[in-house]
Image (cartoon, rainbow, N blue to C red):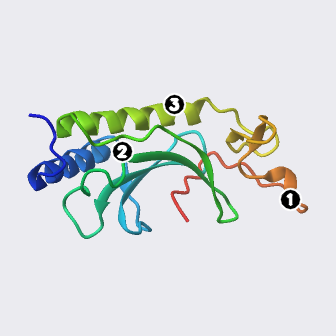
Amino acid sequence: MPYDPDNLNHRRALATHLIGALERAGFEPDPNARGERTYQRRVEGRPGAVLRVFTTVPLDGLAVRGNGRDAIRVVALYCGLDGKVRSLGSEKRVFRVGESPEAIADRAIERCREAYRRVKQRPRCRKCGAVTFIAKGSGRDTCAAICWARSNDPAVFDPDDNRLSH
């Protein structure tokens, strides 16, 4: 049956399928979420790199928000040793229209897989080992840890560092 965003039961089914799919894919609830349920997962082999999914399910609710208000979003972030969070990129939004709740949740998981692959394919900084991103201004690979800007000792690369969020 087609997904109807005006039907509360359909919105509840989508929330259930989405959260279940995220948890099966290894995502955990973000303890620092504000406003809506957010899930996150570390990117193995890329210390500090995290995927975060904004579900459109309010913290106090069991159903996604109504139609036309927003979409499910998947972003890749770098959580630095300095406590700052920097964007590594984002995927196309997952609009919640026209399909079954299962199909919408599957599209969200596919966006997560795409983001995970992109982060895994990014080169590491030669100086500190952090993941790199493409700078908007120059178009060059840039260290997400901004190690080149530090005046004191460079960050020590720790392959077992698995920060989730700050």
Please give the residue where the numbered disc 2 appears in the rendered image: 26
Label 2 – label 1 distance at C-alpha: 34 Å
Label 2 – label 3 distance at C-alpha: 15 Å
Are the residues flagged by discs 2 and 3 in contact, CB closer than 8 Å?
Answer: no
Q: From what the image shows, is residue 4 above or below residue 29?
A: above
Answer with the quarter of the image where residue 88 lies. top right
Q: Nearer the viewer, mark 2 or mark 3?
A: 3
Please give the residue where the numbered disc 1 appears in the rendered image: 150
Are the residues flagged by discs 3 and 1 in contact, CB closer than 8 Å?
Answer: no
Residue 148, horizontal then vertical, whole percent: 86, 50
Residue type highlighted by circle 2: Gly
Which residue: 60% across, 42% down? 46
Residue type highlighted by circle 3: Arg
Q: Secondary structure at mark 1?
A: loop
Residue 117 has which mark?
A: 3
Could you tell whether 69 is left or right of 122 in the image?
Answer: left
Q: Secondary structure at mark 2?
A: loop
Which residue: 20% across, 34% down? 99
Does label 2 or label 1 sit earlier along the sequence?
Answer: 2
